[in-house]
Image (tube, helix red, strand yellow):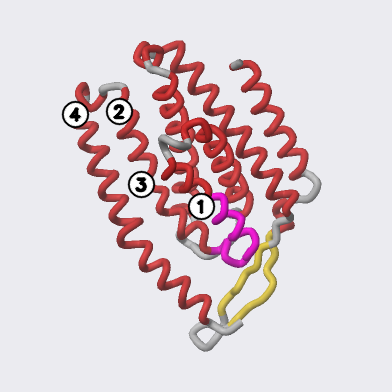
Amino acid sequence: RSLSLSCLSVLLIMFGLMGSSWSSLEESVTSVCEAEVAETEQEKVDIYLSWREVASGALVGVGSCFGIHNVSHQLLSRYSRVYRRMNTERAWRLNTYIVSTFHAAGWAVLSLGKFKNPTSPDGVAFPLALSLGYFLYDTYLMLPQIRKYPDAFIHHLIGISGVYGLFSLRSAIRFVPLIMVAESSTPFLNLMWIAKEFSLHRSFPRMYKALVTTFVSTFFSVRVIWFPILLFHCRNFTRKPP
């Protein structure tokens, strides 16, 4: 089963990369117009990414997520007694949290790295397609648990719809790095859950308290304070004349 999952991951990534090679993703990012800002000029960038390239990125994302999931399962099965004693559901949740941590950390690094030019859409479209693959991966794994975790399932459907909407609107992709800063709190939330599963909150109470403090701080900063500011900024941007 593990070998089959590994082969599936590699095949999905290969098909995705083959699809994206038909046309360069760098050429898909084009500047279409410049508009007024502060009664002078404002750059207004439109993004075009063909649906074939979106599908290719999503395939790479799905394959990568299944690959990380499988590697995590293999390593924990070999080196962790706690993991081997877990039931199927807890082991499944642990591996999905690990994949989620990679996804969230990747977006946090990308978003924070773009803060010098936060509304530039360069280098955003393909990672967004990878995120679509992540949501598809997690939604698929969640289907057997849909009755137990309906809120998480709905959350992922909203995520898939949101990514589709961003690619349909195209110019809204410029706001993705600003929005995905919110993912900065997710790795700490996942690490808190993982620490509890391995009883690390008892073995290393100070480390766990530091995780909790960091999570609360980042959650309050990026989701409670930052999001209203971002929405106000987006509202003003959409009201400006083209």
The image shows residue 162 at horizontal and vertical percentages of: 54, 56
Q: Which residue is mark 1?
A: 158
Q: Residue at x 38, y 40 (%)?
A: 187
- Asked if marks 4 and 2 touch (Cβ < 8 Å), the reply is no
Q: Secondary structure at mark 1?
A: helix
Residue type for callout 1 = Ile
x, y percentage for residue 148? 41, 35
Q: Mark on residue 149?
A: none
Q: Which residues are magenta?
A: 158-174
Residue where numbered disc 2 is placed: 195
Q: Earlier in the sequence, mark 2 or mark 3?
A: 3
Q: Is 142 on the left or on the right of 227, as rendered?
A: right
User: Where 233 sits versus 156, above or below?
Assistant: below
Q: Nearer the viewer, mark 1 or mark 3?
A: 1
Furthest toward the bottom, the residue is 39
Q: Position of residue 34 (x, y in %)?
A: 63, 78
Residue nearest the viewer, comparing 151 with 224: 151
Tag of residue 185: 3
Which badge, 1 or 3, comes first in the chain's sequence? 1
Q: Residue furthest front?
A: 147
Q: Residue at x 42, y 68 (%)?
A: 231
Q: Are marks 1 and 4 in contact (CB under 8 Å)?
A: no
**Where's residue 168, x and y in %?**
65, 62
Per the image, the residue denoted by label 4 is 205
Q: Amino acid at mark 2?
A: Ala
Q: Is residue 227 above or below residue 44?
A: above
Question: Dividing the image into 4 quarters, which one contains the N terminus?
Answer: top right
Q: CA gap, disc 3 to disc 4?
A: 20 Å
